């Protein structure tokens, strides 16, 4: 058996690592995606007052701190048995829409666009945000940085800090929004809508208008037929902050719809000896292995899954784009991994529109910021949609609200099995007998992974001086046939 | 985060890290230790950001010194002194939500964000950064006084008494 390793050696113990095993015929036999997980969060939280957790969890991840803060805030509300008043809930949602705008802009331009606008087979030195700016022009590059910064300014204004958010308190938020701040946010939200529409237009011209790229989306080795999960409101429209978790099967038929406290009746986690990260699956179907199809227990929770699981978008322009996407991709649900980028842009438009709706809502400058607390229930589950999937925070406390137990299912964890399968499918489609593996092949395999916008250890970083990526191909006797390096 | 233009030369000492991920706090801890020693002479900030977000923090300064964690083969507590020329890439490239600091600087230069003309990176070897803890590892706690002395001497020679 031949082994190919894609190993970005960013620190000695490894980061995410992709191991591809070929058989004697030179075809891909199996693929393993290994993640060294951050350890001990549950233990770290034990004994702490539960109301501390919304601020602590922002440090799990430096890129989606707002998501953890929201899920945690909702779990803490439940521990205290309270519901935030309308103004508080809308302030939370307004922050959250800005958070989605910032994150989705970053992902599209820094991570997705290089593949499509510069090209998946382009030289690595060009296949990055600098290459995108070269192609689209400086003015657009400046606009990307500007819109992202504006979204973070809103986060800081409402959340107390752009990264280490402190806004949530049991039953509500710590401070309100002044009329002047509201007016400022309204103008900024109008800018988000404009930029969202522009980004979609760019995608349509650069990607959908390019037959080669459209072919990759529709017919490339990136299709995976799995169930779809997402949070929906009472109209079954996509909602990032609240609602019920809905799962539809591979044909679009509803499998289940549950409220946060019931999550453990529907989701279970499978463990493999070769990975620290668990593999959630649908409990009622059961774990059938790393297989797709309607009988599989594996599901996806991604921007595309959210759109698949819903009946539509709650804002008009996003709804138009939603309808058009499914028309062009010939029906619903869509199972093309790369369509996640398209779905992400539809979500960007929704987040922008909903940011505007919330900003002009008369309640947003209200003064009722917090529910009255009475007694401690002792257990709470908060679920939101993180940019990269359904995020669940589950806390158990004693009668004084001191944490006894914490369980998190983060967005990317939902997709762990699907990511492994997507990488395998891409590898099987791209690595053939006697075909040398090139940098372009390496990148096209990574495209299967990047579409999920995975989040594993964003909060940490170090400087080894050089990021190595090594792909070694061995024959069935273990002899090195080929080595591809990215220096 | 935005800030007003500074008196020239404007120097920022920027500690990077996560204070609940064990040794990843080293950059932040060094800032806390250095700030009282150079009070009134240098500006100190702490952050847990990367890539494009760093541009906002360092824009407008003439000289920025970043203090961060690193993990190579050297013993924990070793202090390295780098400039961007030492790197072709950094690990931040492997964050799937952001770009590495070097590409961020290139983006900033390309689109005309005022960036420091000089960037120094003080990188401290760590033992563990994947475990949640508010204390650093025993190795790094033990090495901390020596780390601070080394950094202090460098700052005196390169920033204050030059």
Image (tube, rainbow, N blue to C red):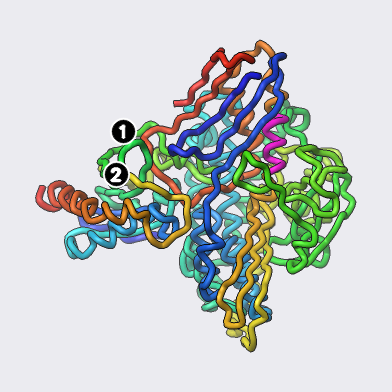
The quadrant where residue A255 appears: bottom right
In the rendered structure, are the residues bearing label 2 and label 1 in contact, judged by CB atoms less than 8 Å apart?
A: yes
**Residue A430: % across, % down:** 68, 22
The answer to whether B67 appears left or right of A344 in the picture is left
Q: Is residue B70 magenta?
A: no
Mark 1 Cα-neighbour bin, 10 Å: few <14, some 14–19, many ≥20: few
Mark 1 residue element: helix
Numbered range of the magenta stretch: A417-426
Tell me the residue that label 1 is attached to.
Answer: B86
Number of dots carrying numbers: 2
The answer to whether A30 appears left or right of A69 in the picture is right
Residue B121 disc label: 2
The quadrant where residue A393 appears: bottom right
Q: Is residue A420 magenta?
A: yes
Q: CA distance from mark 2 to mark 1?
A: 10 Å
The residue drawn where x is 67% and y is 72% is: A380
Mark 2 Cα-neighbour bin, 10 Å: few <14, some 14–19, many ≥20: many
């Amino acid at each position: 058996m031949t082994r190919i390793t894609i190993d970005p050696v960013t620190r000695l113990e490894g980061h995410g690592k992709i191991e591809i095993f070929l058989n004697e015929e030179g075809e891909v036999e199996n693929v393993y995606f290994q993640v060294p997980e951050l350890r001990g969060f549950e233990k770290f939280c034990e004994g702490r007052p539960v109301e501390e957790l919304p601020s602590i969890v922002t440090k799990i991840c430096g890129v989606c701190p707002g998501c953890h803060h929201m899920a945690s805030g909702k779990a803490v509300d439940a521990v205290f048995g309270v519901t935030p008043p309308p103004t508080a809930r809308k302030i939370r949602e307004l922050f959250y829409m800005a958070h989605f705008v910032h994150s989705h802009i970053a992902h599209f331009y820094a991570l997705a666009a290089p593949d499509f606008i510069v090209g998946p087979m382009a030289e690595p030195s060009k296949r990055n945000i600098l290459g995108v700016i070269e192609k689209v022009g400086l003015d657009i590059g400046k606009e990307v940085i500007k819109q992202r910064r504006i979204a973070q300014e809103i986060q800081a204004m409402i959340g107390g800090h752009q990264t280490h958010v402190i806004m949530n308190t049991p039953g509500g938020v710590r401070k309100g929004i002044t009329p002047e701040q509201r007016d400022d946010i309204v103008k900024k939200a109008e800018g988000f809508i404009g930029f969202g529409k522009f980004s979609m237009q760019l995608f349509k011209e650069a990607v959908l208008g390019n037959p080669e790229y459209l072919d990759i989306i529709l017919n490339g080795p990136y299709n995976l037929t799995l169930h779809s999960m997402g949070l929906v409101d009472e109209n079954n429209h996509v909602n990032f902050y609240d609602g019920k978790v809905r799962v539809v099967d591979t044909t679009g038929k509803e499998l289940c719809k549950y409220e946060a406290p019931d999550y453990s009746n529907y989701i279970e986690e499978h463990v493999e000896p070769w990975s620290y990260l668990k593999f959630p699956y649908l409990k009622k179907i059961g774990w059938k292995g790393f297989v797709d199809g309607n009988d599989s227990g594996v599901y996806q929770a991604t921007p595309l899954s959210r759109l698949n699981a819903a009946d539509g978008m709650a804002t008009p322009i996003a709804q138009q784009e939603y309808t058009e996407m499914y028309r062009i991709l010939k029906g619903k649900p869509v199972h093309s991994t790369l369509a996640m980028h398209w779905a992400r842009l539809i979500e960007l438009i929704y987040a922008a529109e909903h940011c505007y709706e919330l900003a002009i809502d008369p309640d947003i400058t209200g003064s009722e910021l917090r529910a009255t607390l009475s007694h401690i229930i002792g257990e709470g589950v908060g679920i939101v949609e993180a940019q990269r999937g359904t995020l669940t925070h589950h806390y158990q406390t004693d009668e004084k609200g001191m944490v006894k137990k914490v369980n998190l299912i983060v967005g990317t964890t939902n997709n762990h099995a699907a990511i492994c399968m997507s990488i395998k499918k891409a590898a099987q489609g791209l690595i053939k007998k006697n075909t040398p593996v090139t940098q372009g092949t390496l990148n096209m395999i990574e495209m299967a992974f990047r579409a999920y916008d995975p989040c594993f250890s964003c909060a940490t970083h170090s400087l080894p001086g050089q990021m190595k990526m090594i792909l070694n191909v061995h024959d069935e006797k273990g002899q090195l046939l080929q080595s591809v390096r990215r220096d | 985060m935005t800030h007003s233009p500074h008196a020239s030369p404007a120097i920022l000492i920027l500690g990077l890290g996560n204070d609940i991920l064990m040794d990843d706090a080293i950059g932040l801890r060094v800032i806390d230790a250095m700030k009282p020693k150079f009070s009134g002479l240098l500006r100190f900030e702490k952050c847990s950001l990367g890539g494009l977000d760093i541009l906002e923090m360092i824009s407008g300064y003439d000289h920025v010194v970043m203090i961060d964690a690193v993990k190579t083969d050297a013993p924990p507590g070793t202090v390295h002194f780098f400039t961007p020329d030492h790197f072709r890439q950094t690990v931040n490239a492997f964050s799937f939500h952001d770009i590495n600091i070097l590409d961020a600087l290139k983006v900033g230069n390309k689109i005309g964000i005022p960036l420091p003309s000089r960037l120094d990176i003080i990188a401290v070897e760590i033992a563990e950064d994947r475990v949640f803890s508010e204390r650093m590892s025993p190795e790094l706690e033990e090495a901390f006084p020596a780390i601070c002395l080394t950094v202090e001497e460098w700052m005196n020679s390169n920033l204050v008494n030059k």
